[in-house]
Amino acid sequence: GQQVMQIPQYQHVQEGEDFTTYCNSSTTLSNIQWYKQRPGGHPVFLIQLVKSGEVKKQKRLTFQFGEAKKNSSLHITATQTTDVGTYFCAGPQANDYKLSFGAGTTVTVRA
Amino acid sequence: DAGVIQSPRHEVTEMGQEVTLRCKPISGHDYLFWYRQTMMRGLELLIYFNNNVPIDDSGMPEDRFSAKMPNASFSTLKIQPSEPRDSAVYFCASSPGQGSYNEQFFGPGTRLTVL
């Protein structure tokens, strides 16, 4: 079935720096969702992107959906220790009834 | 709102024993999902329900796993007999609408250890 690939798997960031994590699909997605899971916690919904080329911002987080709707990115500016966790993208599988989660990007922050 | 409730939060059992995980979705949500998370395989969808009816159980690893949703407020995931490779965190999630278009609300998870 549909697979969503995420890179990088791990991201070690100096506090205050920016970083970007990427999500890629081999097929066009009707929409894409992003979730964050803190260490020891559960996935929490961050945002959903639906339109081609859509860009949404949440404070220091910027989410983008590619023009071809096959890729997405999450950019975090001025990383803080509160950004620690694993960020997952998730896209619908072929039948559009369920989500396929990427492997996630695990972010650690050096103070 | 209480959110999705799962019990127990931790379960340690011995190989061969039956394990039952429980979930109470958010009231009014029509979709309920059971996921398993491991380091090796990531977050996997096991089964999902719509209006208490199982729709897709293709992710259930084998016959040892079964899930039920007797009413809109309660679902169980049962493993019988359990094996060490079943050790994982099991999440229940609910959604107000079709899962791929709606936000999924995850419960805190049940950390299962099978010795």
Image: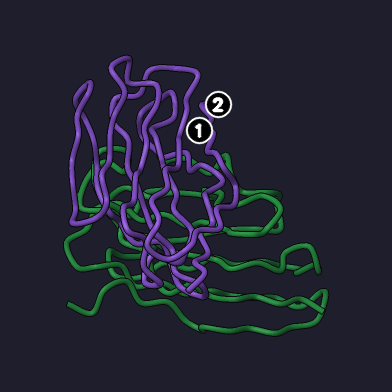
Chain colours: A purple, B green
Between disc 1 and disc 2, the foreground one is: 1
Element marked by disc 2: loop
- The amino acid type of the residue labelled 1 equals Val
Element marked by disc 1: strand
Residue A38 in the image: above or below residue B61: below
Residue B32 in the image: above or below residue B10: above
Specify whether A79 is left or right of B13. left
Marks 1/2 in contact by CB < 8 Å: the verdict is: no
- Which of B44 and A15 lies nearest the eye of the viewer? A15
Specify whether A19 is left or right of B21. left
Which residue was labeled with disc 1?
Answer: A4
Specify whether A14 is left or right of B112. left
Q: What is the quadrant of the N terminus of chain A in the image? A: top right
Residue in view at x 71 percent, y 77 percent: B113
Q: Chain of mark 1?
A: A
Q: Are marks 1 and 2 on the same chain?
A: yes
Residue in view at x 42 percent, y 77 percent: B6
Q: Residues within 10 Å of mark 1 (few under 14, many from 20)?
A: many
- Picture quadrant of residue A98: top left
Distance of label 1 from label 2 (alpha carbons): 10 Å
Residue in view at x 71 percent, y 69 percent: B87
- Which of B80 and A76 lies nearest the eye of the viewer? A76
Residue A32 image label: none
Q: Chain of mark 2?
A: A
**Residue B24 coordinates in the image, percent (x, y):** 34, 73
Which residue was labeled with disc 2?
Answer: A1
Residue B28 in the image: above or below residue A5: below
- The amino acid type of the residue labelled 2 equals Gly
- Picture quadrant of residue B81: bottom right
Residue in view at x 68 percent, y 49 percent: B61
Q: Residues within 10 Å of mark 2 (few under 14, many from 20)?
A: few
